Amino acid sequence: MFPHPSWPRHQAVWQAVLPALEPGELAHDRYHIERVYRWSLRLAGQAGADQELCGAAALVHDLALVPKDSPDRALGGERSAQLAGAVLTQAGYLAEECRQITDAVRTSSWSRRLPPAGPVGVVLQDADRLDAIGALGLMRNLACAQRMSRRDSPGRFYDPDDPFGDAARPLDDRRNAVDHCFAKLLGLAGGMHLPAAKAEAATRHAVMLAFLDALRAELAP
């Protein structure tokens, strides 16, 4: 069951988070949060973290959605942390618990390249980044690419002249979805902290490599 029935505060937080989610945002929808939540609970023990606080951090980590093509894309974690304080307090979290959770959310954004804040931050980084790779990560990447594609600035699945950046051109993952694999996704497995996250990330990394190999074969002249 989601959220876990053992923690009533999670139920209260989720009831506040759910209406705030942006409709139609497939890459950051309720199911993304559910997946990050479940992995956070699973990883907490390996980090020596409080499982209940890790679950709460997962629930509020995407409260503020900053579009991936926004110049402020790196501030999503910071803005989510700012919004999370009131939600957590209303759900009954104490000041020190709120600090641990919001610090974890603040350091969760990949774009800012911040080290995780404490054990809860370690768990949240790994859980959130696992959802960015593998088959799920590829689907989320394509959803983001479609979201960023506009009439005045159309996106593409790949650069038609150099789909895989073989010519050492500058990567442009705001226009080419495949570029995001090389700009970010293929590097995430190497940055995992916890043993279970590392093992899962290796499996998902292999899925992405297989996808890119298949795509290269299909695009071959």
Image (spheres, rainbow, N blue to C red):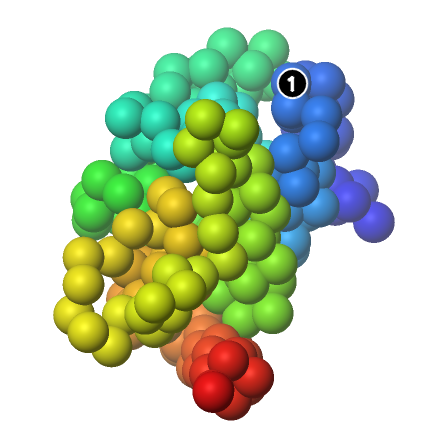
Write the residue at 65% across / 25% down. Answer: 21
Q: Is residue 220 visible?
A: yes
Instruction: Pinpoint residue 26: horizontal percent, then vertical percent.
Output: 66, 41
**The disc labelled 1 sits on which kind of residue?**
Ala
Q: Is residue 132 visible?
A: no
Kind of element beneath mark 1: helix
Determine crowd level at label 1: few under 14, some 14-19, many 20+ residues with C-alpha closer than 10 A: few
Instruction: Pinpoint residue 116: horizontal percent, then vertical percent.
Output: 27, 48
Write the residue at 71% across / 46% down. Answer: 31
Q: Is residue 39 left or right of residue 153?
A: right
14 in relation to 88, above or below: below
Among the 4 quarters of the image, the one containing residue 48: bottom left
Residue placed farthest to the right in the image?
Answer: 1
Q: Is residue 94 left or right of residue 92?
A: left
Instruction: Pinpoint residue 170: horizontal percent, then vertical percent.
Output: 18, 57
Q: Nearer the viewer, residue 59 or 8?
A: 59
Q: Nearer the viewer, residue 103 or 183?
A: 183
Instruction: Pinpoint residue 63: horizontal percent, then vertical percent.
Output: 53, 25
| Residue topped by disc 1 | 20
Write the residue at 50% across / 80% down. Answer: 219
212 in relation to 98, above or below: below
51 in relation to 72, above or below: below
Residue placed farthest to the front in the image?
Answer: 221
206 in relation to 137, above or below: below
